[in-house]
C-alpha cells in the first residue's frame, strides 16, 4: 500500500519540472530546452527558480497544514487563506476570488459570480492532499468534494476531484490502471456530492441559486467526467488548458505510461498549463508506486514562504513530518 510522503514528493517534483514550461508552446519548449527535459529548468514566467514547485504544490501543502489543525474543512480554509495572505507569485483567478470571501461558501459565491461558468483546474490540482491526509472510501469522497468546492464549486470540478482521489486510493491499493479508473468512476457515479456540500455547510440558505444550478448540472457533469476519463485511458486528450476536464483527461492519458519520467515528461513538454497537468500526473504516478528520480529530490523546494512553510526548506526534509502531523487515524 502506497501512502503519504512518496506521492507528495512525486507531485511536487512534477510540478517543479513543469514550472519552466508553463504557458509556453510545444514548439518554444523544444527550441529552448530540447526534445527531452530530465532536470529542473529556468524560465518560469512567475520567477520560480529551478527546483521550486508552484501554487499547485503550495496549495497541497497548505491543505495538509490545514488538516493538521484538526478542525476539518474550516482548518483547510484558514490555511489556504494564510497561504494567499502571504502574496504567492501565482494565484488562480477563481481561487483568489473564492478565498477572499473568507467563508465556507466562498467558492460557491465565486462560481455564482462567474455566471456558473467557471470550471478551472484549481481544485483538482490540490485535491491529492485529501488522499495524502489519509481519508478513505466515502469519507475521502466527501472531503474531496468539500475541499474542492472551497474554491471551485462547479460540479465538473467537484466530480473530477472525487474521481481523482478515488483513483489514487485504488491505484495505491495495487489495482491495475484501467481497473482502478473503472472503480473510481463507479465511486463518482454513485456519490451524492450535493448532499456532501450541504452537510459541510458549503451550500446553505444564502446560496440557493447556486445549489439549484449545481443540481441542474450534476448529472451532465458526472457524464463528462466519465467520458474524459475513458478518452484519457484510450490515449486521447484535448489540450493542456486550465479547464478542469482537459486537465483530467490529459493527466489520465499521460500517467498511464510505464515510468515516472515518461508520465511526467509528457505533460512538461506540451506546455500550456503544464505545471498543473504535471502535478496531477505526479500524484497519480506516486500512487502507482513510481519513485521520483533521485537527482530531482535534493533541489526540490516550494516557491513561496507563508505561515507553516519557508521557501528555502528542503521538501525531502520537511514533507515526512508534515504527513505524520496530518494522517487521519
Ligand atoms: Mg502552478
Image: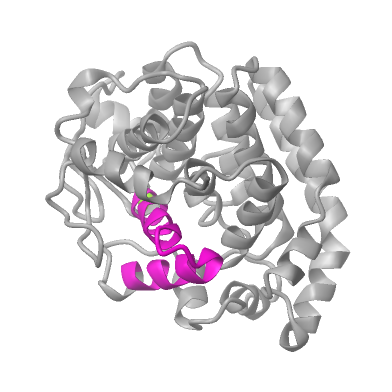
Q: Position of residue 273 (x, y in %)?
A: 44, 45
Look at the picture and state if 324 lies above or below 201: above
Does the magenta run of residues contain 61?
yes
Does the magenta run of residues contain 183?
no
Q: Position of residue 237 (x, y in %)?
A: 62, 31
Residue shown at 15%/34% (left/top)? 299
* Count of numbered marks: 0
Q: Is residue 226 left or right of residue 161?
A: right
In this view, the residue farthest toward the front is 329
Q: Residue 84, located in which quarter of the rendered image?
A: bottom left
Q: Position of residue 228 (x, y in %)?
A: 71, 36
Look at the picture and state if 8 lies above or below 305: above
Q: Is residue 105 left or right of residue 302?
A: right
Residue bounds of the magenta highlight: 57-83
Q: Nearer the viewer, residue 60 or 237?
A: 60
Q: Is residue 142 left or right of residue 263?
A: right
Residue shown at 76%/71% (left/top)? 198
Look at the picture and state if 284 lies above or below 119: above
Q: Nearer the viewer, residue 198 or 19?
A: 198
Amino acid at each position: 500500500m502506497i501512502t503519504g510522503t512518496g506521492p507528495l514528493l512525486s507531485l511536487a517534483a512534477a510540478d517543479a519540472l513543469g514550472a519552466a514550461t508553463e504557458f509556453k508552446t510545444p514548439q518554444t519548449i523544444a527550441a529552448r530546452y530540447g526534445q527531452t527535459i530530465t532536470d529542473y529548468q529556468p524560465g518560469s514566467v512567475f520567477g520560480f527558480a529551478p527546483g521550486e514547485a508552484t501554487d499547485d504544490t503550495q496549495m497541497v501543502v497548505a491543505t495538509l497544514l490545514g488538516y493538521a489543525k484538526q478542525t476539518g474543512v474550516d482548518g483547510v480554509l484558514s490555511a489556504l487563506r494564510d497561504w494567499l495572505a502571504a502574496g504567492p507569485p501565482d494565484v488562480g483567478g477563481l481561487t483568489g476570488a473564492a478565498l477572499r470571501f473568507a467563508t465556507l461558501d466562498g467558492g460557491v459565491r465565486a462560481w455564482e459570480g462567474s455566471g456558473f461558468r467557471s470550471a478551472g483546474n484549481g481544485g483538482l490540482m490540490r485535491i491529492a492532499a485529501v488522499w495524502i491526509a489519509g481519508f478513505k472510501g466515502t469519507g475521502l469522497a466527501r472531503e474531496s468534494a468539500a475541499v474542492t468546492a472551497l474554491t471551485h464549486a462547479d460540479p465538473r470540478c467537484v466530480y473530477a476531484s472525487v474521481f481523482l482521489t478515488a483513483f489514487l486510493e485504488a491505484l495505491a491499493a495495487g489495482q491495475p490502471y484501467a481497473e482502478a479508473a473503472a472503480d473510481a468512476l463507479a465511486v463518482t457515479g454513485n456519490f451524492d456530492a450535493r448532499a456532501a456540500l450541504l452537510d459541510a455547510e458549503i451550500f446553505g440558505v444564502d446560496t440557493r441559486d447556486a445549489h439549484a444550478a449545481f443540481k441542474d448540472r450534476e448529472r451532465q457533469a458526472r457524464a463528462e467526467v466519465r467520458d474524459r476519463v475513458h478518452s484519457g485511458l484510450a490515449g486521447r486528450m484535448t489540450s493542456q488548458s486550465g479547464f478542469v476536464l482537459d486537465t483530467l483527461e490529459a493527466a489520465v492519458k499521460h500517467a498511464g505510461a510505464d515510468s515516472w519520467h515518461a508520465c511526467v515528461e509528457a505533460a512538461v513538454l506540451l506546455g500550456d498549463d503544464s505545471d498543473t497537468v504535471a502535478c496531477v500526473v505526479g500524484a497519480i504516478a506516486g500512487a502507482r508506486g513510481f519513485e521520483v528520480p533521485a537527482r530531482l529530490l535534493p533541489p526540490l523546494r516550494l516557491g513561496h514562504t507563508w505561515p507553516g512553510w519557508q521557501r528555502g526548506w528542503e521538501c525531502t526534509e520537511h514533507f515526512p513530518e508534515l504527513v505524520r502531523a496530518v494522517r487521519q487515524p
